[in-house]
Image: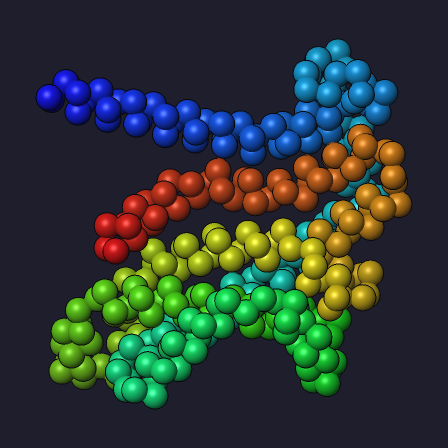
Amino acid sequence: MNLSVRGKRRLKAAVTNGIMMAIMIFYLLPFWYVVNNAFKERSYISLQPFTINLDIFTLDNIISAFSKMNYPAAFFNSFAVLAISCLIFILLGSMTAYGIYIADHKFFNRLYVLFVALIALPFQAAMVPLVTLLRTLHLSDNFLGLALIYSAMFMPFIVFLYTGFMRSLPKELMESARIDGCSYFQVYAYVYMPLLKTVTGIVLVLRGVYVWNDLQVPLIVINNPVRQTLQQRLYVFAQSRIGNFDLVFAGALLTCLPMILLFLMMQKSFIKGVMAGSVKG
């Protein structure tokens, strides 16, 4: 009986690992295709698309794409949008969740339900009113306006995460801090926010990567070429060089490289945060 159970568990583990390996290969193949062909001349891409040969290795594509895309300026634009968006995500999301948590009132509980329900609202349904509102407030073609659009898109999900995590913490922490003389804001800043590092990290990674890689929202908000993000610059760059796959692959690699490097540097912290969150849940 025990041998049968062990056999079933091993079979289940083998099947699960096989499926995960297939998914990993499915995601890695397109990335390898881009990385491999970004360092080749155009004539070799169709001849050797999946193999790399040091004899045909070249950095000319990277250098040319870096220069023609005006990469430093576009990188700064994307970084500015990402920084402003993440700041709004953390401050407004955590403070809204904190207010819902400490009030514990029917009105705020219903407000929380409304926030959760808004997660199902697609961006396309609110796209036209949001863009019209930005123009009315003179925030169109502006980094802050773009960040506010992302905040409107993701705030329900962020409030949901922060509120759920706060409700898993004992309220005795707040009561003890209040007895010691802390104000509600001090309790939020010095007691709860340090305990919310896990969910904050998850918000930064999940929503931050989306903001960096998004093309749709910048296309409808940013019109000034000087303020274009990396994704917009890559889109324009690829449209003007149809057939020049060597330069397009090089530009795509330069665009996604910052997020790849960031994940490689922070993967241990991210994994620890996910594990801590799963244990708390």
Q: Position of residue 128 (x, y in %)?
A: 71, 75
For residue 220, above or below residue 110: above
Q: Residue at x 28, y 50 (%)?
A: 278
Of 41 and 23, the residue lying toward us: 23
For residue 3, above or below residue 172: above
Is 113 positioned to the left or the right of 219 in the image? left
> Is residue 145 in view from this perspective?
no
Q: Position of residue 47 (x, y in %)?
A: 79, 16
Q: Position of residue 59 (x, y in %)?
A: 75, 27
For residue 147, above or below residue 244: below
Q: Position of residue 186 (x, y in %)?
A: 29, 78
Q: Residue at x 38, y 76 (%)?
A: 113
> Is residue 153 in view from this perspective?
yes
For residue 58, above or below residue 73: above
Specify how the rendered protein is coloured.
rainbow
Q: Which quadrant of the view contains residue 112?
A: bottom left
Q: Quadrant of the C terminus?
A: bottom left
Q: Quadrant of the N terminus?
A: top left
Q: Residue at x 22, y 20 (%)?
A: 7
Is 25 positioned to the left or the right of 232 in the image? left
